[in-house]
Image (tube, coloured by chain):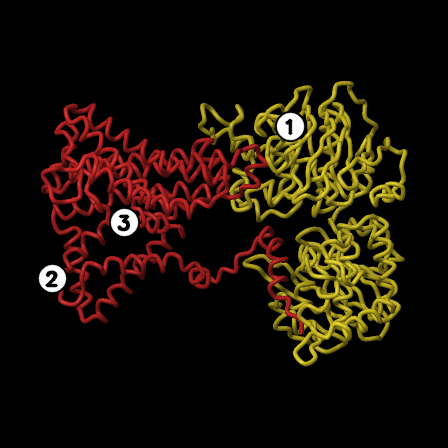
Amino acid sequence: MTSGQTPAVELRELTKRFGGVAANAGVNLRVKAGTIHGVIGENGAGKSTAMKLLYGMLRPDAGDILLGGTRCNWASPADAIARGIGMVHQHFMLAGPYSALDNILLGAEPVRRGVIDRPAARRKLEALAGQYGLSVDWDRPIEELPVGVQQRVEILKLLYRDARILILDEPTAVLTPQETASLFENLRKLRAEGKTILLVTHKLKDVMSFTDRVTVFRAGKVTGEVATAQTDPQELANLMVGRKVVLGLHVPPARPRPEPALEVAKLSLKGGAGSRHRLAEVSFAVRRREIVGIAGVEGNGQSELVQAILHPRESRCRTAGVVRVLGREVTSWAPRKIRELGVAVIPEDRLLEGLLPERPVRENFLLGLQRSRAFSVAGFIDSQRLSEAASVAVKEYDVRPPDLDLPAGKLSGGNQQKLIVAREFQRQPSLLIAAQPTRGVDVGAIEFIHQRIVAARDGGAGVLLVSSELDEVLTLSDRILVMYEGRVVAEFERGRVTERELGLKMGGA
Amino acid sequence: MKRIIQPVLAVAVGLIAGLAVTWGAGENPWHVFRILVKGAFGSGYDVGMTLFYATPLIFTGLSVAVAFQAGLFNIGAEGQLTLGALAAAAVGAVWPGLGSPLAPVLAGAVALAAGTAWGAIPGWLRARRGSHEVINTIMLNFVAAGLASYVALYMIKNPDSQNPETRPIGAGYGLAHFGLFGGAPVSAALPLALLAALLVWILMGRTALGFEIRAVGQSEAAARAAGIDPGRIRIIAMALAGGLAGLVGIGEVLGNSGRFILGFSPEYGFMGIAVALLGRNQPAGVVAAALLFGALHKGTAELDLETEHVTREVSLVFQALIILCVSADGVWCWMGRGERWSVGASERGAGGAGGREMRWK
C-alpha cells in the first residue's frame, strides 16, 4: 500500500499449521479502511484459514493481527466481535423458525427489567436499515424469507453489533444475478459509510466488478496483491493457479443423435408436510451427444429431480410420472440396475454422497463399481486389478497426490471431484448426470472437469448438467432449462439467451 | 503399527490400574497378579478353561464387530446367543436318537439359523421401519430370555432336575473335548470360532458384500448414491451378526453342558461389545481381545479362594478399566500431539466450529 495511512486490518507473517501442513505460511495482508477488499484463492489455498484467524476462530502459531495499528490477540470470536469484526459465513447461522428481528437480537438482546426490549431494538434496527438501504420484513420467520434477504439479515446482525470490519465468505454462492447485484449495491453503501469489507470468494467476476483491491492466495501464501482496476481475470487466475489457465472453454456445438438418453415425462413430487409440489409436471428429454443444462437458484427442485431420476422407487421421492433411461422405463427399478445401464453420476455434495472421506482413494474408486465385472469375480474383489485400474485413472485424471492409500477426505476439493469423475467415467457412461460438478473446485480443476464433460458428450453420452453457476450452464449447455419452484419455466438453445434473461427467469419473472 | 501398540498399551495401563484398585482394597497387587496369571495359564486345564471362556466371546465379539462395520450397534448378541443355544438344545432334546456327525451339524445349523433370524428382526425394523436397532435389540434380549424360560420350564423341561434347564440332548450330539486341556470342555467350537473370524476377515476385506457393508457404515448417503441399498445391507449385516452370536450355542450346549440351562451365559453378549471395542472391530483383534477377557474371567475366579479382600467380580473392574483406557481417544491424540488435520474435516468443521463458538457479546 502506497499511502502512509494505517490499514484497518493487517495480517503480518501469519502462520498456522495443522499437523505437518502449513495452512498459512507467513501470510501478509493489508486492508485499507473504507474499501472492499477481495480475497481469492483456490480451495485449500488458506484464505478461509486466514479469515478464521482474523475472526478468532483459530489462533495463529506465529505472526500478528493488527487492527488500526494495534496488535490483537483473540481468545475467541467474542473478542474479535468486541473489536468490531463481523463475519457472514457461507452457510448462514440463522434459527429458521425465529423472526428476522429475533435472529438479529439472538445473543445480544437488549433487556429492560428482565424483559427483551423489542421496541427499542426495532427502532435501532429500522434506523440502521434505513441508513444502509437494507429493508427486511422483521416479523416473518426467517426460513420463509428468500436467501438474499436472509443474507441481508446476517449483515444487519453484524451492523447491530457495531461491526466496522465485515468478512463475507462466498456471499454470492447462493444468489441469482439480480440478488448479487443488489448485495453489491448494499456493500457499496456500507463502504460509503466507512465500513471495511473483506470479500472472500472464488469467483473472479465478483472480484473484478466490486472490489477495490485484491489479495490472491495460493498454497498457504499470498501470491499477489493488486489494485482491481489494474488487473484482469486472466492475471488473477494465473496467480491463483500458478500457471496459465484457459478461461472460457470453447465448446464446439453438439451433433446430437436422435435417440434419447434420458426422458422425463410429467414427473411430479409432493413436498413434505402438505406443502406445495416440489416437482410439478416436469417433462424434458436429453438426447445422446448433447448437454442439457438445468439452471436455477438452489432449492427450486433440482436436487429432487436428480433424486427422482436415480432413486425413483424410494418413498421420499414417490413420483407421479415416468422416467426412461436409454429407452427403458426405469420408474420401478432399483437404483443399482439404473446405474448399470451406463449412468454416471457426479453428486451434488461430494463429501456426503460422492465419497467415503475416511477411506483410502482406492476404496473410493471402487464405490459403486464393487459389483462390476471389471473388479469383481463371483462376489470377490480383485484387488490387483482394482489397484492397477485405480493407478491408471488417478494418473489420467490428474488426482494429486497420486496416493491410493490416502483417505479421500484429505484430498483438496478439486482432487476429490477429479477422483469422482475418474470413477464414474469407468462406467463408459451413456448418460451422465452432473450436479454442481465444479462447486468448491479450484480454477484449474474446473477447466479439467469441463473438458471431461464435453469429451463425454462427444463420446456419445447424453449429459444432464445441474448447476447454479450461470457461467457453467452458459458455457457447457447445448440447451438450457430453467427451473423455478419445481417447474421448468423456460427453455433456451445455446447462444440464444443472455445472462440477464436467464437470471430473470431464475428469479421467477 | 499404532493400531496395535495403542490397544496393547491400553490393556497394560488398564491392568495396572486394576491392580492398583486391589491394592487399595488391601491386597498385595503383585500377589493378585500372580494369582491371575496362574489361574488363567497355570496348567493345561486352566489354559483350557481360558479358551473355553474365550470361545463365546469370539463369536459375540465378531457379532458386534460385523454390525458395527455397517454402522449398527448390536446390543442384542445376548438374546441372539440365547436363542441359538436354546434352538440347539431343543433339537437335541426332541430328536435324541440322531447320531454323529449329522446330529451336531444339524444342531449347529439350527443354532445359526435361530441367531440369524433373531438378528434379522431388528435389522429389518431399522431398514424398513426406521426404528432404532439399539432399542429393538435390547428389547429382543428380554423377549429371548422370556421365550427361553418358557421353553425350558414348560415345553422341554428336564424332569430329573430341580434346575431351570431343558432335557439333555442325545448322546450323538455331544462334541468331544480336546485331550490337551486336562478335561476342560474345549471342543470343536474353538476351531469353529477361529474359522468364523477368518471368514469374517475375508468377507469384510475381500468381497463386494463386505465392501458394501463397510460403505454403508461409513456413509449411508454415499452408499445410497452409489446404487447400494442401505436397508438391504443393514438387514444382511444384522442377520450375520445374529448368526455369529447364535453359534455360541454350539460350544455351550453341544460342547459342554449338553442342555440349555437358563442363565448359562455370564453376559457373553454384552462382553462381546467390550471385546469388539478392544479389538477395534477387526477379526484378529476380536480373537486377541476375547482371549484376554477369557483369561481375566478364568484368572479372577481364583481370587475368591486365594485372597481376603477381593472376589472374582474384580474381573469386571479390570474390564471396565481396560475399556476406559481403550476408548480414551483424546488422551492418545494428546500423547501424539495429533491435531489431526484434513481438508475434509476442516471444511466440515468450519460450520460446526463457527456455530459453537459464535457467542455474541
Q: Which mark is residue A343?
A: 1
Say few, some or many: other residues with alpha carbon within 10 Å of mark 3 (under 14 / 14 to 19 / 20 or more). Answer: some
| Residue at mark 2 to residue at mark 3: CA–CA distance | 25 Å
Residue B264 picture quarter? top left
Say few, some or many: other residues with alpha carbon within 10 Å of mark 1 (under 14 / 14 to 19 / 20 or more). Answer: many
Q: Residue furthest front?
A: B154
Q: Which amino acid, mark 3?
A: Glu
Q: SS at mark 2?
A: helix
Q: Nearer the viewer, mark 2 or mark 3?
A: 3
Residue that badge 3 annotates:
B267
Chain corresponding to red in the figure: B
Q: Which amino acid, mark 2?
A: Glu
Which residue lies at the image location 63% right of the left edge and 31% below the top edge?
Answer: A312
Q: Is residue B241 left or right of residue A276?
A: left
Q: Is residue B361 visible?
A: yes
Residue that badge 2 annotates:
B306
Quadrant, the N terminus of chain A: bottom right
Which residue lies at the image location 82% right of the left edge and 30% below the top edge?
Answer: A478
Quadrant, the C terminus of chain A: top right
Which residue lies at the image location 89% right of the left edge and 37% below the top edge?
Answer: A497
Q: SS at mark 1?
A: strand
**Chain A image colour:** yellow
| Placement of A73 over or under B117, stated as above or below | below
Same chain assignment for discs 3 and 1: no
Q: Position of residue B289 (x, y in %)?
A: 30, 49
Q: Is residue A6 left or right of residue A277?
A: right
- Disc 1 sits on a residue from what chain? A
| Residue at mark 3 to residue at mark 1: CA–CA distance | 49 Å
| Residue at mark 2 to residue at mark 1: CA–CA distance | 70 Å
